[in-house]
Amino acid sequence: MKELNTFRQFNEGVYDIQLTPEQLRTEFYSAMKTMDKALSKSKGVIPQEQWDALYAVVTKVEDVAQYIGD
């Protein structure tokens, strides 16, 4: 998680381009596709409880992303 937080801090303010809601949804869906691949590769490798928690995060992002711009 430390690496992710460092990445987030490093990238704050980097993207000044205004995106449409549809473009933002596409960005989130692209990221979710990457997360889905990582989840499928980690199934059976990490403890089920951790996998379930990660899956819940991806599912929550998907649920919310569909409403961007509504």
Image (spheres, rainbow, N blue to C red):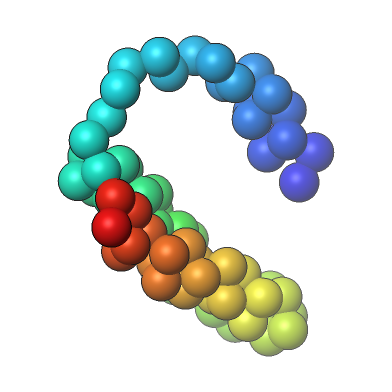
**Residue at position x 49%, y 14% in the image:** 14
Residue shown at the point (43%, 18%) measured from the top left: 15
- Relative placement, left or right, of 42 versus 28 is right
Residue 54 is drawn in which quadrant?
Answer: bottom right
Q: Is residue 39 visible?
A: no
Residue 25 % position (x, y) = 28, 50
- The structure residue drawn at horizontal position 68% and vertical position 85%, both measured from the top left corner, is 48
Residue at the farthest bottom position: 48
Q: Nearer the viewer, residue 42 or 22?
A: 22
Image quadrant where residue 51 sits: bottom right
**Image spot of residue 10 (x, y percent):** 64, 18
Name the spot of residue 61 as percent of width and height, x first. 47, 63
Looking at the image, the residue that sits furthest to the right is 2
Residue 21 location (% of width, % of height): 25, 43
Q: Quadrant of residue 52?
A: bottom right
Left or right: 46 with respect to 11? right
Query: In the figure, 31 relative to 38: above or below?
Result: above
Give the side of residue 24 with respect to residue 36, left or right: left
Q: What residue sits 33% from the left and 62% below the top?
A: 67
Q: Nearer the viewer, residue 44 or 49?
A: 49
Q: Considering depth in this image, is 26 or 32 the residue closer to the camera?
A: 26
Question: The C terminus appears in which quarter of the rendering?
Answer: bottom left
Q: Is residue 58 above or below residue 13?
A: below
Does residue 41 appear left or right of residue 4 in this picture?
left
